[in-house]
Image: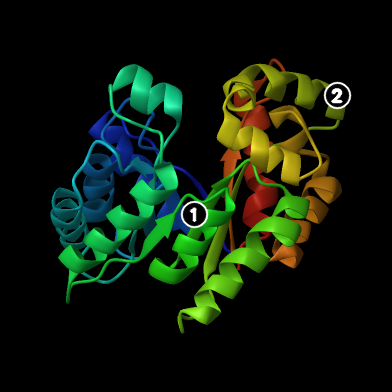
Amino acid sequence: MRIGLSGRTLGFDRVEEQAREAEAEGWSHLWYAGGSGGDALLALAFAGRATSTIELGTSVVQTYPVHPAAMAARAQAVEAACGGTGRFTLGVGPSHQPVIEGMYGLDYSRPGTHVEEWMTSLNRFLGDKPVPVLVAALGPRLLRVAGEQAAGTILWMANARAIDSHVAPRITRAAASAGRPAPRIVAGLPVAVHDDVDEARAEAAKTFAVYGTLPNYQRILGHGGISSPADAVIVGDEAAVTAQLEALLDAGATDLWAHVFPVGTDRSGSRDRTKAVLRSLLG
């Protein structure tokens, strides 16, 4: 399996240290969140200079606040920092109405139109120095845009059912219609190996509660036949977690982004147990 983890965006010494450790341990990729308090692209550039083989990507940076020309220039600079070897992937997305309108004061009335136009412009500015782009696509229109104009999509809170019935058919059809290669589908979900499933879901309900309040995530949860982020997370013992990860691949995911979260009083031990299972599945 191609499995990646969440990357740090704060404390550049630690950013570099984590990236070197992840590369040495054989993880396929690290994903850096644009809304985690640091500059994801800057952190990724530091990580890129500290490593040589691991894929590094954003998950995701927001489209609205950054003009496509500026994003293209930054993406090409980060690709250069990664050695110009094509191991940087730019994940982008429109974010959510409370952020774009409430915090930034920008109009969020037509996010689908915005992303489609933004991607057309970005690809033009990238020109003959392309960088692989993944669009955070949860709805039909953005899945079409991701298939037609990008290398694929990076998801969050989409379970196997949502990928199988909603994501994979739409993005694959759009890519084929546009004459593009089969799209990449990166499935991002919180993961914890823990014997008490109820305890793990209760912890997830607290940790990831905000995603259940946002309409975009409410819709993708609905496509998965669930209503809460606590129902979307990958939890259980070693065998159960392995089976759930395999189900994501069977549904159409090409890569797994495992956001490891701790459960119980021994938080370090909890993380280590989960990572040990994930490492056993690499390859």
Kind of residue sitting beneath label 1? Leu
The N terminus - image quarter: bottom right
Give the mark nearer the N terminus: 1 vs 2: 1
Nearest the viewer among 237 and 251 is 251
Residue 17 shows up from this direction: yes
- Residue found at x 73% / y 38%: 232
Q: Is residue 168 above or below residue 116?
A: below
Residue pointed to by mark 2: 198
Left or right: where does residue 187 sit relative to residue 7? Answer: right
Q: Quadrant of residue 150?
A: bottom left
Kind of residue sitting beneath label 2? Asp
Residue 91 shows up from this direction: no
- Residue found at x 18% / y 57%: 72
Nearest the viewer among 74 and 48 is 74
Nearest the viewer among 176 and 207 is 176
User: Which disc is residue 142 wearing?
Assistant: 1
